[in-house]
Each structure stands twice: as C-alpha cells, then as structure tokens.
Amino acid sequence: MTDLGGTPRDLVPVFEGFHGMKAVQTSPLYEHLNTAFITEPELAAALLAAPPTERLPLLLFASVHFLLRNAPAEGDAALAAYYPSLGGSRAPDSELTGTFREFTTRRDTELRALTSTRVTQTNEARRAAMLRPALTAAQKRAGDREIALVEVGCSSGLMLLPDRYGYRYDQPDGSVLEFGDPATPELLLQAVVRGDKPVPEWLATPLRIASRVGIDRNPISADDTEQTDWLRACIWPEHLDRLARLEAALAQAREAGLDLRRGDLLDLLPAAVAEAPRDAVVVVVSSHVLPYLADADRTAFAEQVAELAATRDLMLVLNEDHRFGRVFGVEAPGSAGYVAASFVDFTAGDFTAAEAPTATALAKVDPHGTWLEWL
Ligand SMILES: C[S@@+](CC[C@H](N)C(=O)[O-])C[C@H]1O[C@@H](n2cnc3c(N)ncnc32)[C@H](O)[C@@H]1O
C-alpha cells in the first residue's frame, strides 16, 4: 500500500486538535495513545495511506480495533489487554506506547489496507431521543394519518426505528417523562433536559409509521457482519454501554428488515418520496449528514425538498448544526455551532393549500444524544 504523500510530522496538528477535545477524556486508552502521537507521529504512519482529509486519529484507532476484534493474530494479546471492549482490563501505562508500536509495525500492511479504504462511521441509537421531539411534532401535525419516514444519510438505519425505543427525559425539576416500549433494556434511551424549560408531555404522542426507507452512499446492512463489525470497531473501547446499545438496535434493524438504498441523497430522494404510501404524510429525516455535503449540495437538497413538498404532503425533521438549519429557514438562537432538533412543516391548513413552510427549532441537543435544552 503506497502512501498518498506527506510525512507523519504533518499529522501533528491533527493530533493536537484531537488532544484539545473534551470527548477524548472518555477514552483513557485513546487519550494516552494520541498524546504519544504528538511526540512520536511515526506511530500513526499508517494514516498516510488515507486521503489527506481522512487522516484522523479515529480512523487509525478504528482500524487497529477492527484488526484486534476481527482478525486477531499471534502477538496481539498484549495490546488487546488494554481494550475493555475485548475483555481487557489493563489501564494505560508506560508499556502501552511500545506495545502499540510493535502492533502497528507488525501489522502495517493490513492497517494500511483499512486506513486507505475506510472512513469512520457511527450510528448512535441514542440520537433518536434528540430526534423524537421533531418526529412527534410531525406526527401531531399529521393527526390520524400515518407518517412515511425517509432518512437521508441513514448509515444502518437506526433512526428509522423510533417506535422500537423507550424514552426517558430527566426534567429540570427532577421529574421524569418516560414513554415508549423498548424491545430490550439497552433501548431505553435516557436524556437529561438542561436549562429551566421541561420538554412537553406531548412528546409521548405515539408515532404511526407507514413505511421506512433509508438512503446512504454507504448503507450498512444490519445483516452484514463485516460491515457492522466496522461500526463496532468505531466505538471507543471503554464505551461498553454504546456497544451494547448498538447490538440491541442492530437486532431491531434486522427484525424490521429495513429498506436501505445505496446512492447519493440528491439522486435517490425523489423516488423514495414518490414511492411512499399514498395516504401517508412523508417525513424526511436528516441527522448529522449536512456537514458531509458541499455548500452547493446543501442548497440543492433544500431546494429539492421544497420541490418535493409541492408534489405531496411532506415535512422535514433535522438533527443538525443549527447553522445548516438556516438553509431550510430554521432560525435558532445563538451563534456558536450546536446541533438543533428542528421541524419544518411544508404543509398548510388542512394539507390542501401550499404556503410558505413554517420552520421551528425545538431544542438544542447533544450530538451524542445525552442531553437536550428546550428552546
Ligand atoms: C454521521 S453519519 C449519521 C448517521 C445517522 N443519520 C445518525 O444520525 O446516526 C452520516 C452518514 O451520511 C452519509 N452520507 C454523507 N453524505 C451523503 C450523501 N451525499 N448521500 C448519501 N449519504 C451520505 C454517510 O455515508 C454516513 O453514513
């Protein structure tokens, strides 16, 4: 595998940037290794096989994790001992960097085969607790009619299963709003409500889902072990609760037999909307996808959704950086980038008249799905 240019030293600013992120503290293993990369970037040389935009420590970490999980070789046990996800219990210590160096040198070819072809991918079921307010708003608007979910950038489609999760919102006054029927205890999604406004009780309005279609340029079938193992490898080794939730959610996706389509969202959305059951109200969902689009494609997506809304009753649910919400007419307070659960209603009155859409930012939400703040 040939390198795509550059030297390990070029990667140092990326490692420094990762070092400054709060999230890295939730993985003592990755924090320790990333700190070592800053002084010894050669440890991460396998990243040079990746295109420059993909040279992120998390790609290397996921690739190492994948090899340890899926293709363990003689000599790997010393490194695996540091991975709680693999049954290890050794805390990072002075031998970790040397053990990592030995692993990456010995398995360099296999590592580069991964870093040159993969990108990190996540599908966190807990984000469904962030989407739920806007989905329920769409259901309330649809009234007795069913909703047809079309998710763009669906990954393995876990946001298409909102009726299979339970929800627990810990309100600011200490009370709890809990509803839904989780298939297993791992699928009770818990979120803390920050600020002083409680989330309203109408969130518990049941959803009536007619159909579910997901679109992704790289969809992950819950039946495909190789693909889902990459999702598992992308979870940080200490995050055992996330791993358990992913397993439980993937089992639901398998049971639901989701219709996931491969391709660019701009190419596939019109057919997915047109094919939705005739009497249903289409709800297009976009969660953590817009950062991947070029500015022009984001605008094209917004125009396309508006055009499709002229062909049938349609609403849009966003779980995206609030700056992107503006492309869809959603104005949320504040200037810093944060994710907002937003609801855009392209329908009007009794659904027969087409008017300017109403766009509402409902909440500021945590990208990982642990808290939200009602606006
Ligand atoms: C961060 S994941 C989000 C997955 C899921 N929506 C969630 O919230 O957990 C972003 C997904 O968008 C997909 N994606 C990015 N650009 C796309 C495009 N132009 N067309 C289709 N899918 C795209 C990626 O392949 C990836 O699976």
Image (spheres, rainbow, N blue to C red):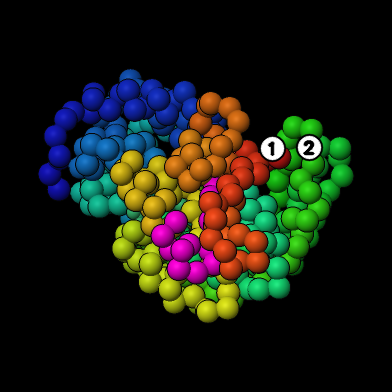
Q: Is residue 361 visible?
A: yes
Q: Secondary structure at mark 1?
A: loop
Q: Is residue 60 visible?
A: no
Q: What segment is highlighted magenta in the picture?
A: 306-319
Q: Nearer the viewer, residue 339 or 9?
A: 339
Q: Residues within 10 Å of mark 2 (few under 14, many from 20)?
A: few
Amino acid beneath label 1: Leu
Q: Residues within 10 Å of mark 1 (few under 14, many from 20)?
A: some
Count of marks placed on residues: 2
Q: Earlier in the sequence, mark 2 or mark 1?
A: 2
- Residue, disc 2: 197
**Do tag 2 and tag 1 residues touch (Cβ < 8 Å)?**
yes
At x 65%, y 44%, the residue is 362
At x 53%, y 79%, the residue is 278
At x 86%, y 37%, the residue is 173
Amino acid beneath label 2: Lys
At x 46%, y 63%, the residue is 310
Quadrant containing the C terminus in the rendered view: top right
Q: Is residue 326 left or right of residue 205?
A: left
- Residue, disc 1: 375
Q: Is residue 308 left or right of residue 118?
A: right
Instruction: Check the image and report above or below for 303 versus 56.
Output: below
Residue at mark 2 to residue at mark 1: CA–CA distance: 8 Å
Q: Is mark 1 within 8 Å of ligand 1?
A: no
Q: Secondary structure at mark 2?
A: loop
Residue 345, x across and y down, in percent:
58, 55
